[in-house]
Each structure stands twice: as structure tokens, then as C-alpha cells.
Image (cartoon, grey):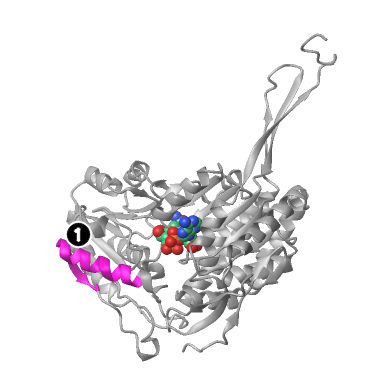
Amino acid sequence: MTTTPALQKTQLLIGGAWRDASDQGTYCDANPATGASIADVADATREDVTAAVSAARRAFDTGKWPTMAASRRAKIVYRLAQLIAERSADLALLEVRDNGKTIGTAKGELGAIVDTFEFYAGAATKNYGESLPPPLPTYLAATVREPVGVVGAIVPWNFPLLLASWKVAPALAAGCTIVLKPSSVTPLTAVELGKLALEAGVPEGVLNVVTGATREIGAWLVEHPDVDKIAFTGSTATGKVVAATAARTLKRVTLELGGKSPSVVFDDADVDAAVAGALYGVYYNAGQCCEARTRILVHDRVYDRFVSSFTEKAQRLRLGDPEDPTTQIGAITNADQYDKIKAYCEIGASEGARALFGAAPADVGAAFAAGSFWSPTAFEAEGSHRIAREEIFGPVATFIRFADEAEAIALANASEYGLAASVWCTNIARANRVARAIRCGSVAINTPYAVFPGVPFGGYKQSGYGRELGMETMRLYTETKSVLTYVGEKPMNPFGV
Ligand code: NAD
């Protein structure tokens, strides 16, 4: 049973010191499952964001972090991973109370966060440049990878600490300094990350954390001329604004944006495994997942069997108290998102899509009457329906039939997004053929899982650009510098002076 924790008061981390917002402003952060206030959060002003950027700039331009031996930086990042592992139970509970996700989900994320910091601790010492063929016999030529500078890391509310780790870990490993801006609705674990980073030995000013109630905080970071790179995860609409604003100062930008990813179920699939995987793929984290497999494309021959088994199993998913380890689906993280899900269910019905189940708020008991819970929902839809095309970001599946492989591929690609896909099929030749034909960043064959440290993750099309989680991510936190050394016998004298 959920207990009410003491109201926490948070501050901003700027230049290694914790401080209130310059105008003492705060805002209230609530638990979406209970509606209870859980924290009084510092509401950064533009002056605070400027101070955080200045601290990061100073730490980059005059501090030791960017030029420190990579092996030393690696040890600090690894130490941070260990501290997160030691505090993972508390961090998981904090994430549950701030976000409404289930404790099981949060614990899984904490494991992945530790893995991510460990992975990039290792990457710090493998940030190789190249030895190049000499352009002239009297030259040596090489490239070195240098940190890109000050990184503005902007994260959404669905996986607050996990998505922060995808940015902070490679940025630290590369020698960058950072201003981390969590979503206003889930700021608490970012604040804890700031504390642990200082404890791990990350020098002051290298990681700054600014929280706040307004979206402007992110915009101020993107506009600031002293920020060299923006690593952004969020909606496609906001991502476009970020890219346009960042272009004014030619910042480097990585965009991890929205999705409308398919699960493609062929007639030779192991239907039970496909049902289990597709259920998880769409309802995991209450569907508030960028790579959620919300479009379930099923071959005519197995469609009825698949849909009836999916429907029967979906009714058995356990919704409710996010702190109960047996709960499988928690709360919708914020009221706006809840309203959006409700509106899309109404749009689906008005467009003629047929609701198979759900499409209504979930009653999970009096203790959570003030929380936001939505029932797992599924519609039989057509590709043209808005609910089958637009990102809902909630527990809403759409089923669409297909007759053959070509139609399956066409339907899978009939989306402005291109983040991920699952293919369910026992013919491995076909599974790989289809995987290659779907235009998206990750394809998971016979599994809903596609996200692991070390495996690049990111989008095609309107799902963004750049990749997180891979070794290639290190390139996105570095610049290439070419170093040419003249090694001729005689000094150079091009003008013969
Ligand atoms: P959002 O775009 O509203 O906000 C994301 C972050 O950007 C928040 O911290 C927000 O405060 C900030 N922000 C808002 N306006 C800004 C601006 N003009 N300039 C700079 N920053 C600004 O997204 P959200 O509602 O918090 O998150 C849900 C979205 O995130 C979904 O579309 C989802 O698909 C996407 N997402 C993508 C991935 C991925 O890896 N591709 C992962 C998780 C979530």
C-alpha cells in the first residue's frame, strides 16, 4: 500500500553548489497515482539558466574535466554507476512516486541506468581518433576526438532518469560539461543524479541541474550562445522547434522524438509468443513509451486467433498501486496526457474504429481516486484513422490486418515516424528481409525489446536524428580535430622567402 512520503524540497545544482531559484520561486510536484504533493521544486528563472550555462562553460573552458586523462574520467563515471546501483532501491521508489510507473518497471530502468553509465565509463578510454594515410610523404596525419563542449540535455517525463542517463553518461565520458533539464512533471531523480555525481567526484560545474515549471527553461538553454550541443528527447513538434532555434547558433543537435511503431505478426509466427510480446510492446509503462508498438499489424490467417487471445490476456493485466510489485500497469504521468488519451479514444470512435476493449478510465480503488489511470485499450482500425497514424502516448493499441508480406511492409512504413518495429515470424529469412525493408532505427525480431546499452537507438524520418546508447554516440559528443605534423628533412618554405 502506498505511503505518503514527507514533502521534499529541491534546489538547483549550479557550479557545484545547491541553491534556490534566484527569485525563490518553487512549484508543486505531485504523485500522479494519488494526486498527493510530493515535492516543492525550485523553479529556475532565466537568470538561473544563464548561471548554469556559465558554470558549465567555465568548467569546460578552464576546468580539468575535458583534458583529464580519459582513464581518470572513466573511473569517475564508473564510480557514479556504482553509487546509482547502491541507491537504486530509493531511486526506483522516487521515480515511481514522481512518474506513476510501476515499481517493477522502475527497478528494471535502474538496472539499465547502471549499465549505461558502466558502458560509457568503458567508452571513455576508447574514444579513438584515426591515423590517416599521409597526404604528402613529409606529413603525419591523425584525427583526435575532442569533447564538443557544453551540452544542454533536455529530457521528457516518461523515463526521467533513464533518458537523462542516455545523455549524461556519454557526455561525461567524452569530457563535456552539461546542463541537465528534466521535465517539469518528473524532476526528482535528476536532482538525485546531481547529488550522486558530486559524490562520485564529478568536478563542480561539470553537471548542472535546472528544474522548473515552464517549458521556457528548455528554450532558454537552446537559445543560449554558450551551449554547444543540445541532446533532446521529447515530442516531434517540440523537436522541430528545438532544431530551428538551435540552427540560429549552429548548435549540434541530437533529436530522439516520437513514434508510432508497428508489431508485425506473420501467419507463421508463434502466436502465443507474439501476443505476449505485443501486449508488453504496447502497454509497457502504460504505453507512455516512444518506441511503443502501438500499431499491431496481423496477417489475415492468424488475425482472429491473435486478437481474441490478445483481448483475453489484456483483461488480466494488473493495474493499480504503482508501489505494489505485482502491479503491471501504473498511472498516466500527467493530467494533460490523460486528457490526450481520452480525446484520442473519442476520435477513434468518431472515425469509425471499433473499440475491442478499454477506451475508458480505469477504476483502481478509492486510494487512487485522485490519480490518473487509463484502461488498456484496443481498436480495430484502418491505416487512415488518426488513432492509427498519430502518436497517442498511452495504452492504446490499433489492430490492422494484412494479406501478404508486401502489404505488411507497406503498412509498417505508412507512418511519418520511424523509431522501432517488432517482427513476429518463424521464417528467419523473411524476418530479416522485412527487418531491412522497414524504415526505422531498431527492429526487434520475435521480441519486444530493442533497447540495450551498446545498441544504437534512434529514429528515421520524423522520429529524429542521431543515435543514443551506442559507441557511435560518442561521436555526437565530440568534434573531430585533424592534426597534421610536418616531418620533412628540410623546413617548409612555400613562398621561398
Ligand atoms: P515535450 O516535447 O513536450 O517535452 C520534452 C522536454 O522538452 C521537456 O523537458 C520540456 O520541458 C522541454 N521543452 C518543451 N518545449 C521546449 C522548447 N521550446 N525548447 C526546449 N525544450 C522544450 O515531450 P514530453 O511530453 O515531455 O514527452 C513525450 C514525448 O517524448 C513523446 O512524443 C515521446 O515519443 C517522446 N520520447 C521520445 C523518446 C526517444 O528516444 N525517441 C523517448 C522518450 C520520449
Q: How many marks?
A: 1
Residue ID at (25%, 48%): 411
- Asked if residue 87 can be seen in this view, the reply is yes
| Foreground of the two, 211 or 452 | 211
Residue lying at the far top of the rendered structure: 496
Q: What stretch is highlighted in magenta?
A: 338-359
Residue ID at (25%, 60%): 387
Query: 399 above or below 491?
Result: below
Residue ID at (43%, 49%): 240
**Quarter of the render that holds ligand 1:** bottom left
Residue 326 horizontal side relative to residue 60, left or right: left
Task: Name the residue type under label 1.
Answer: Ala
Tell me residue 81's x, y (percent). 66, 64
Whether disc 1's CB lies below 8 Å from ligand 1 is answered no
Query: 436 above or below 221?
Result: above
Residue lying at the far front of the rendered structure: 23
Quadrant of the image occupied by residue 377: bottom left
Q: How crowded is mark 1: few (under 14 residues within 10 Å), some or many (20 or more)?
A: many
Tell me residue 476's x, y (percent). 58, 45
The residue tagged with tag 1: helix, strand or loop?
loop
